[in-house]
Amino acid sequence: MGIGIIGLGFVALYSIVVYNQLIRRKMLIEEAYAGIDVQLQLRYDLVPMLVEVVKATRLHESSTLKEVIELRSRGMSGTLSVEALGKNEVALSRALARLMVNVENYPELRTNQNFLELQTQLVDIEDLLGEARRYYNATVRYFNIYKQQFPNVLIANLFRFSDGTYFAVSEDNARKSPGVSLS
């Protein structure tokens, strides 16, 4: 009888420890997501400034600029799941990269100091966003591995912990920052 109580106490204590670890790791995921959100907001804030500078040229008629504006609006809506937001951000990164390539055809933009500063800021934000994504995905992986280990999986299932969702960037070229051309 005494051994059974000790065993039951050990199981209860272990369950509490695992539950608290799952909560802690879930909170780390939320914190990491907030880091992505900060960088996304910085990028979203930069897009209207880029649009205003670009409007001075015929480039404002391009479908790429319209796509950038649309993707920014969709990303800012706050209604997208982590997976959908990741896909939207891949598309926005691609559209911004195409916009920067299109700028090469407009010498007045390539020499516009405001545009060059915005372009440099965009590159910096893209780099920080990449770091935030990597950190977020590492915390998700850390959580998922811990959750799937035996006997942790029993406690996780008992308390209905779902797997963390990765902030997916599906293609390597989508991770690249748009280049800054100073020529």
Image (tube, rainbow, N blue to C red):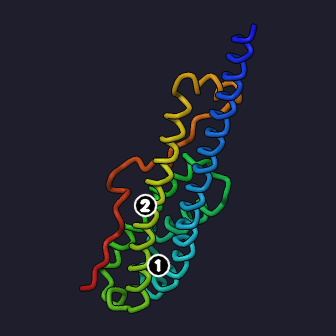
Please state the horizontal and vertical placement of residue 122, each as a whole percent of the image. 43, 74
Please state the horizontal and vertical placement of residue 10, each as a whole percent of the image. 67, 23
At mark 2, the secondary structure is helix
Q: Residue at x 43, y 64 (%)?
A: 95
Mark sitting earlier along the chain (2/1): 1
Q: How many marks?
A: 2
Q: Mark 2: give few (<14), some (14-19) or many (20+) Cα within 10 Å.
A: some
The image shows residue 39, relative to residue 28, as above or below, that is: below
Which residue is outermost to the top? 1
Left or right: 77 in relation to 118 = right
Amino acid tagged 1: His
Residue 60: which disc?
Answer: 1
Q: Residue at x 66, y 42 (%)?
A: 23
Left or right: 16 in relation to 118 = right
- Residue 94 quadrant: bottom left
Q: Residue at x 38, y 85 (%)?
A: 116
Please state the horizontal and vertical placement of residue 22, each as a whole percent of the image. 62, 38
Q: Quadrant of the N terminus?
A: top right
Between residues 132 and 142, which one lies in front from this camera angle? 142
Q: Residue at x 46, y 88 (%)?
A: 56
Between residues 134 and 72, which one lies in front from this camera angle? 134
Between residues 65 and 140, which one lies in front from this camera angle? 140
- Residue 111 quadrant: bottom left
The answer for how far apart the CA atoms under marks 2 and 1 are is 31 Å
At mark 1, the secondary structure is helix
Residue under numbered circle 2: 131
Amino acid tagged 2: Glu
Q: Mark 1: give few (<14), some (14-19) or many (20+) Cα within 10 Å.
A: some
